[in-house]
Amino acid sequence: MLKAGQPVLFSGTPCQIGGLKGYLGRDYEQLYTIDVVCHGVPSPKVYQKRLDEVVALANEPIAKVNFRDKTTGWKRFNIIFQTASHTFATHKRRGPYMRLFLGNLSTRPSCADCAFNNKRSQADLTIADYWGVNKHFPLFDDDKGVTLVLINNHQGQALFDACHSQLECQITDFEHAAEYNAAVAKKMIPHPGRQQFFQQLDHQSLASLANEFLGPAEQ
């Protein structure tokens, strides 16, 4: 499509944008890229284990997974694993899968040395949750979600300008944007028990492991 001169919008994690740029080896005027601020990438093995646990509980296959169900609000969103007749919904800080992810037990080691956060993105635009918007711009906070947009270059500026009239925007700065979203500016620090966690992964449930390494879930 790029060789044919067609406009292309590619979105992904920051390292996926870096991989695309490295593969192409040159700039394309018609290529636009957007990355999402990334806490880290969780292990596929841990994800598959969670799917297997849900299937065992429901005795039927997974039909749908929703990592950001905002029925209860943006700040206290739920993770939902759904089968044909059962729904397993847990708060992001109560369910074992997300607890292990946010506690940096299940994230990949490469994410601890991220080369793309803290203003090093190779994408034209970076988007993220604007955590802390209730403190900096309380009138914007409807608990349905506010998106932070970082404009990284002239291409990103052109892309943003093209849709600006359809958005409700407020200018902010990097320091405020990163204040409550650590992944914007900081590297993920692996949990010290990560290696032991993976050694025990085949022998314990995710809930048992989360309680062992992270303590009881918040109520």
Image (cartoon, rainbow, N blue to C red):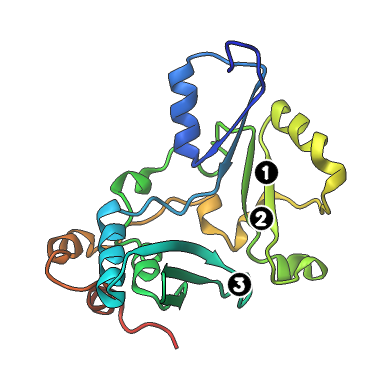
Element class at badge 1: strand
Residue 156's spot in the image, x, y percent?
Answer: 70, 32
Q: Choose between 181 and 160: the one closer to the eye.
A: 160
Disc 1 and disc 2 in contact, CB within 8 angstroms: yes
Residue 177's disc is: 2
Residue drawn at 82 percent across, 54 percent down? 170
Q: Seen in the image, is 163 located left or right of residue 191?
A: right
Disc 3 marks a residue whose amino acid type is: Lys
Residues at marks 2 and 3, CA–CA distance in whole angstroms: 16 Å
Residue 150's disc is: 1
Q: Seen in the image, is 102 located left or right of residue 183?
A: left
Residue 75's disc is: 3
Q: On screen, 41 above or below 53?
A: above
Residue 34's spot in the image, x, y percent?
Answer: 60, 37
Disc 2 marks a residue whose amino acid type is: Ala
User: Which of the two discs, 1 and 2, labels the residue nearer the N terminus?
Assistant: 1
Residue 81's disc is: none
Residue drawn at 44 percent across, 37 percent down? 115
Residues at marks 3 and 1, CA–CA distance in whole angstroms: 21 Å
| Mark 2 nearby-residue class (10 Å; few <14, some 14–19, many ≥20) | many
Closer to the eye: label 1 or 2: 1
